[in-house]
């Protein structure tokens, strides 16, 4: 089978011919149809974060396809089921986090395309308990970006407890941001989209943003203050500066939701203690979403409540595709069709 493999953090991905993996006990084999390129895959390929994957490995955690073989003991999935392989590839299922609805914090979790081989390939094995069924109404092409970009921003809006009429500023209208705008709208927020290019802002408007700010030409903090300040700011742009601007755009009682994960070498974000305290600001870290969150995301899409904006690419174009994401030359998401 074809697979795009990271062989070193300073090298382009290599397209390799690999044997189709065998599903072990409790696993399924998935013939992938669509596989989204998340910015996290780029961080993985470059070894950007404090905890690094070990090359060689196959990235990809927005994988959608059809189950073609069952490992020993798998009774609750069937050959022919269409499923999604998300970042949360496995969790223990027993710890306090797992049993209280926070499986995404499990200390024993394994992550697809990071600590185990992922979906930039024609086939992948996955834990049968952690793949998520895709409803018939949702195409594999749409399901792919929903599997990480969708569930992550859906959860970010949930943990911020946005209520109708609140003002939500979304910093970064990329793969994640174009869906964040829609989930914020779904819960009744007034939405401000912030990015560096007019194309992204135009897209945000089409998807329901009420206001847009081009941070390349306008100070987003002042522009948002002029609108009355944000109740919630979601940081999706891959630079600490955007986190600091997102924080500074909050009004009293505001919540900063930290989602993007800039390279460690970009340094920390700096937040003023005085303003945090006097304004009663909450700073919330938010990591992907649970299997149940993803099922909800699929259901909303099946109901026609969200729109996925993505372009189709071939796996052979993986390195050019990474370059396009890094230079924000994509409409929103790139999806490899396999
Ligand atoms: P992306 O590259 O598709 O989108 C980033 C967007 O930010 C682009 O549109 C870009 O133009 C914009 N941008 C860049 N600098 C900006 C600035 N200063 N102000 C405003 N906008 C700016 O990336 P993505 O796939 O949406 O992922 C975003 C980040 O989220 C990545 O760091 C990724 O690793 C992380 N991520 C986190 C989680 C999580 O669970 N916390 C899940 C998925 C992805
Ligand atoms: Zn992702
Ligand atoms: Zn656990």
Image (cartoon, helix red, strand yellow):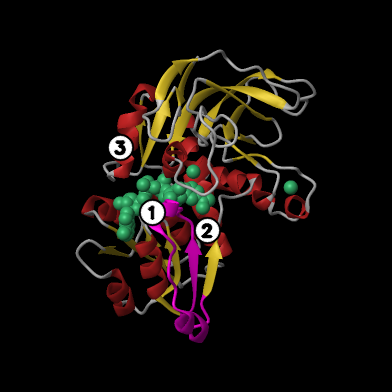
Q: Which span of residues is magenta-colored? A: 252-281
**274 within the magenta span:** yes
User: Which residue matches tag 3?
Assistant: 323
Total marks in image = 3
Is residue 173 something that shows in the picture?
Answer: no
Q: Nearer the viewer, residue 262 or 26?
A: 262
* Image coordinates for residue 236, horizontal then vertical, percent: 42, 56
Residue drawn at (76%, 24%), measured in percent from left and top? 25
Q: Looking at the image, which residue sits at the far left?
A: 217
Q: Secondary structure at mark 1?
A: loop
Q: Position of residue 317 (x, y in %)?
A: 33, 26
Whether 131 is drawn above or below 289: the answer is: above
Asked whether the beta carbons under mark 1 and mark 2 sit within 8 Å of each other, the answer is no
Q: Quadrant of the C terminus?
A: top left
What is the spatial separation of the Cα atoms under label 1 and label 2, in whole angstroms? Answer: 16 Å
Check mark 1 vs ligand 1: CB closer than 8 Å? yes or no.
yes
Mark identifier at residue 156: 2
The numbered mark at residue 63 is none
Does residue 72 lie above or below 321 as drawn? above
42 to 153, vertically: above or below: above
The earlier-in-sequence mark between 2 and 3 is 2
Q: Which residue is mark 1?
A: 238
């Amino acid at each position: 089978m074809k697979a795009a493999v990271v062989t070193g953090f300073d090298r382009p991905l290599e397209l390799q011919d690999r044997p189709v993996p065998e599903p072990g006990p409790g696993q399924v084999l998935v013939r992938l149809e669509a596989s989204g390129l998340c910015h996290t895959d780029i961080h993985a390929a470059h070894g950007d974060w404090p905890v690094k994957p070990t090359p060689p490995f196959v990235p990809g955690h927005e994988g959608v396809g059809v189950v073609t073989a069952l490992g020993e003991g798998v009774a609750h999935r069937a050959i022919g089921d269409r499923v999604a392989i998300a970042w949360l590839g496995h969790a223990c299922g027993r710890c306090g986090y797992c049993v209280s609805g926070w499986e995404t914090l499990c200390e024993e979790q394994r992550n697809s395309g990071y600590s185990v081989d992922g979906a930039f390939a024609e086939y992948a094995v996955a834990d049968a308990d952690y793949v998520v069924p895709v409803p018939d109404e949702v195409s594999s092409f749409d399901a792919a970006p929903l599997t990480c970009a969708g569930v992550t921003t859906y959860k970010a809006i949930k943990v911020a407890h946005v209520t109708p009429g609140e003002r939500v500023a979304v910093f970064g209208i990329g793969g994640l941001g174009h869906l964040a705008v829609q989930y914020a709208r779904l819960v009744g927020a007034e939405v401000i989209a912030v990015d560096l290019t007019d194309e992204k802002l135009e897209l945000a408007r089409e998807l329901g943003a009420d206001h847009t700010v081009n941070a390349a030409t306008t100070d987003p903090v002042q522009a948002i203050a002029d609108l009355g300040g944000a109740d919630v700011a979601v940081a999706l742009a891959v630079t600490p500066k955007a986190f600091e601007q997102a924080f500074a755009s909050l009004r009293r009682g505001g919540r900063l939701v930290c989602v993007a994960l800039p390279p460690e070498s970009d340094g920390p974000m700096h937040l003023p203690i005085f303003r945090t305290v006097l304004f009663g600001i909450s700073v919330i870290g938010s990591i992907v979403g649970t299997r149940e969150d993803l099922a909800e995301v699929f259901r909303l899409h099946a109901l026609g409540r969200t729109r996925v904006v993505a372009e189709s690419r071939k796996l052979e174009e993986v390195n050019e595709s990474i370059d396009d994401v890094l230079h924000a030359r994509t409409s929103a998401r790139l999806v490899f069709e396999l």
